[in-house]
Structures are given as structure tokens and as C-alpha cells.
Amino acid sequence: MNPAFSVIFFTVTAGTGYGLLILLAVSRPFGLLPNVSPDQVIGTGLLGLVLVTAGLVSSTFHLSNPKNAWRSFTRFRTSWLSREAVFAVLFYPLSLGWLLAEFFTGASALSAALSLLTAVLALMVLVCTAMIYASLKTIRQWHHPLVPIVFVLLSLLVGTLTLLAMGAAFDLDIGRLAAVAASIIVAAAIIKLVYFVQLGQPGGPTINTAIGFTKASVRLLDVGHSGDTFHTREFGFQVDRARIMWLRAGVIALAFAVPLLIVVGALDGGALPLLVGAAVSGYVGVFVERWLFFAEARHVVNLYHGAQQT
Amino acid sequence: MKLGLVIDLDTCVGCHACAVACKQWNTSGTTGPLSDTDPYGAEPGGVWFNRIRHYEVDEFPVSKTVNVPMSCMHCEQAACVTVCPTGASWKREDGIVLVDQSKCMGCNLCAWACPYGAREPDPEAGVMKKCTLCVDRINDERLPESQRQPACVLTCPTKARMFGDFDDPESAVSVAVRERGGYAQMPELGYQPVNRYLPPRPTPSVEVSDQTRGEANVDGGSLIGKWMRRQKEAFDAYGRAPDAHGAPSPSDADGEAAR
């Protein structure tokens, strides 16, 4: 698949914002950030909303007819993209209500209730975004049960790293949050590695089932068009194996190894520049991961263009 | 009703006439225009509802060229319809899958969901377009009955395309599929495509000697064998200087032929 910048930026940036707000919402009931003040919650919450909004605005850039975008709220019962749109819009009144409750009532029962609803809705948006990809049977690298789990965990990962940096900036005790961040990083790393291994397994349709000749070899003689088509541009994107391996190593280093080292070092309180570095490293690592998620996806249409398997 | 196409891979010669007829009808019809990009330039491109690809099946010398025209399969489990967030993609009672261009927001998700490459976005209009099974022909009662068929079916010079209702077991398409073993492409994905392909008819086997199988027999004593040997010698000698035995150079041979 052609890795479209607008979609990658959307899923990573909005994912960071949702992850940050989820962690911020549960930090008070679980005591992850002791003595966090309402002002600090509001400041961090607004940062999360800015990230979410930047991502959502970017997502509309890949629409070629955005004047009909409002219609995407109408097929909630069948389309994951429609569900994502509905939850993403519902998210705003709830999250803004939470921050307003925080502003007027502080750490009250009302703000606690609204914060948890915000977290649930943020999780729903993340799952819906992932299911847009995971529901496509045409791309076996996406039609995989680990895809939604990876999406949620990586969003939580960058979100937690961002919240850690904010906590350090506010001079709070971040020891417990650092422990949570370390567990999220380890869980995400394990699941992503399992996913990488499973991508190497052969499977899915072949050129034989695509054309319908399953008792003999089939090869493409002529694709029938001299220039590029929408399908060759959108689905024909390929990266060579060596570069994929380098990029996977980069993902493991930037998204998992570097943040894990810094976070483990911050269990007894960490330095702000290091924690900001961990958040940036995590963001860049997940960005590369999302680029690979697209670049490694092989749509079955490629079979008709001569690929022997996906 | 379950309208769709049957394509006979035995008789299809891969001439692309169906694609041209489709483009002509639909670019001037209700779904048109089907925009072209750089039409007179070095890299012409554009929207097509029907594309023909050419494959070689099995290995030489028992290989066969198969031409495979592909358009929308009008699937019974059409994922392109369910993934559509705006309701622009829809399936009619008669089985035809259509795009309502006034509702499409151009997110391309339906094209990602289609395994057959049937959907192509129009960069000019900003909306998704696809085969309509010539819905603006097949139901037009102003046309004579024989003309109420998709443009690709009417134009096919080898009559390799048939249009009809697969729900009617006695329709021409149902009978053809039953008698010729018509099959669906990529059935394992579960989209239940409606269009069917008729496999090439089995051809009677011809006895071939091992020698013929490997290389043309140029050593025979027959007239044809002698002629082929001379051709092979001339071919082998082409571009070489005349040798000691005075064999004519290719240019000499050409000169003689010209005289």
C-alpha cells in the first residue's frame, strides 16, 4: 500500500492524543500522578485535544471530496470508518466537559465520571481506527487479530511517554506512571514482534486462485495498460526486504528500546530533557511503524498484476 | 434477481473491445465523464471500468495464453458497500452495485476493500466510479429489446460475454455456467462474486514426438525437412563472413532474392 502521509500523521498524532487523555483520565483513580492539580490536568488535557484535532484535520486531507464528509456519520451500523467518525465527534463534548468540570469543581465526582467516559470513548475511537484496517480481507497483513491490539498499545505507549514528560515538567512524582509506561512498552514490543514474525508466514490468495487456474502455474504476460493506474499507484508500492529489516530495527530501537531505558531510569524520578527525548523517540518510532504498516501491506489486486502471492 | 456477466475464456481473444465500448458508453452516460489524465502525453492514464489482462497458464510446450477481462463482480457479500461510511455505495434489488456520486466523499476505502480492482476514483470529479452493468441501458425501454444489454456484451466480436439473471436457473447465463463449469475468481475471500468465468474447453491431445517437443525436426529427409535445414543454416550463418567452402553470405542471398 502507498503510505499516505496524511493518514500516517493522523493515526499517530491523534493516537498520541487519545493515549495521553486515556492515561490522564485514569491517573487520578489509580494514583499514577499523586497531587496532580486541576490546572495541570487541564493543561495536559488541552495538549491531548490539540494533538487529536491536528490528527483529525490531517485525516480530511486524503478525502478527494470533503464536502460530503458530514455524510460519514450516517452508516454507523456497518462501516468502521463511520463509527470512528461518530465516536471522534462525540469525544469532544465529553472531553471538554471533563476539562470544564475540572476547572469549576476540581477533583470532584463529576470530573471523575466525565474523565472515565472520555477514556472509554478515546479507546473506542482507537479500536474503530484499527478496525478500518483490520476488517479488510483484501490485505492479509492488516486482516490480523493483533492489528487492533497493536494500534491501542502503541497509542497508549506514546501517550504515556508524553504524560511522563508533562509530569516531570510539573515536578510531580512520576515513579508509578513510569512503571506503567515500562509495562506498556514491554507488552507493545512483544505483540509487535509476534506480529512481525507472523507476517513472514505464507498465506492468503495466490495468482492461481485469483485467475481461477489452480492446477498449473500462472504468470502474467501483459497487464493490459501501458501507464500507471490508480491500482498500481495505490497498491503496487513495494519496499525491498533489506530496507524493511532496517526500518523494523529502527522501530524496535526508537519505539521500544530507547524509551524503555529512559523510563526504567525514571522509576525514581527522571530528568525532564531525557523524558521529552523518550516521548519524541516514541513518536518517531511509532511513525516509522505506521509507515511500515502501510508499506508492508500487500493488496490482493497485486495478484492480477503478476504477483504470485501476497 | 441476480444480474451479472459470464465471460468465456475459451473464446476471448483479448482484443480490449469490451473495455473501449465500456469507456465510450459510460464516459458519455450517467456516470460520465470517465476522466483521463495526460491523455496525449507520455504517461496517459484514466478511469476504466473494465480491464483485460493476459496470462500464460502452465509451462511450454503445453502452455496456453488466457485473456482475462475483469470488471465489477457485483458480489453478493459486497464489502465495498459495507465499508462505505457515507452510504454512497449501495446494492440494488437486482444485485447491481452502484456508487451514488452525490454522496461519495472520496475516501477510497471501498477501493481498498475490493479484491478485484473494480473501483477507480475519478481525480477530476473527486468521487469513486465503477461498472454499473450499464444500468442506464439494460432498463431503458426506449431501446429495442436486443439492445438492452451492457455495452461490453453487445460489442464483443467473439461473443465471449453474456449478461443475464443468475437467479433464474433456465437463463442463458445459468445454463452456460452449469454446462461449462463456470467458476468465480478468488472465492476463498468469501465475497461471493456473481460474475462467472467459463474455462477454456479441453482440446484433443495431439501425438508429439520427443524430438518435436524439444526442437524443430530439421534433419528429416522430406521436402519440408530439407527446406527447414536450409533455413536453419542460413539463420546460423547470418552476419558471418563467407567461409572457405564459399557459402553465400546473407547479403548475397538477399541480393539473389531481390533479383
Image (cartoon, helix red, strand yellow):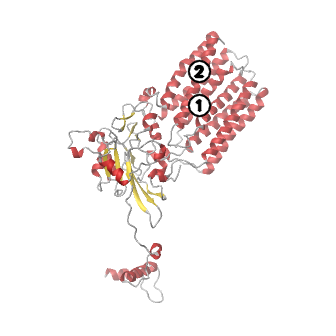
Q: Residues within 10 Å of mark 2 (few under 14, many from 20)?
A: many
Q: Residues within 10 Å of mark 1 (few under 14, many from 20)?
A: many
**Amino acid carrying mark 2 in the image:** Thr
Residue picked out by circle 2: A118
In-image side of A263 versus B108 (left or right) = right
**Which quarter of the figure is the C terminus of chain B placed in?**
bottom left
Extreme residue in the top direction: A105
The image shows residue B39 at horizontal and vertical percentages of 36, 48
Q: Secondary structure at mark 2?
A: helix
Chain for numbered disc 2: A
Q: Nearer the viewer, residue B232 or B210?
A: B210
Q: Nearer the viewer, residue A125 or B24?
A: A125
The image shows residue A269 at horizontal and vertical percentages of 77, 26
Q: Secondary structure at mark 1?
A: helix
Chain for numbered disc 1: A
**Which quarter of the figure is the N terminus of chain B placed in?**
top left
Q: CA distance from mark 2 to mark 1?
A: 18 Å
In-image side of B166 versus A119 (left or right) = left
Q: Residue at x 45, y 80 (%)?
A: B237
Q: Along the polypeptide, which appears first: circle 2 or circle 1?
A: 1
Asked whether the viewer can see residue A14, the reply is: yes
The image shows residue B155 at horizontal and vertical percentages of 28, 51
Q: Residue at x 59, y 42 (%)?
A: A292
Extreme residue in the right direction: A268
Residue picked out by circle 1: A13
Q: What is the count of numbered marks?
A: 2
**Amino acid carrying mark 1 in the image:** Thr
B10 is higher (above) or lower (below) than B87: below
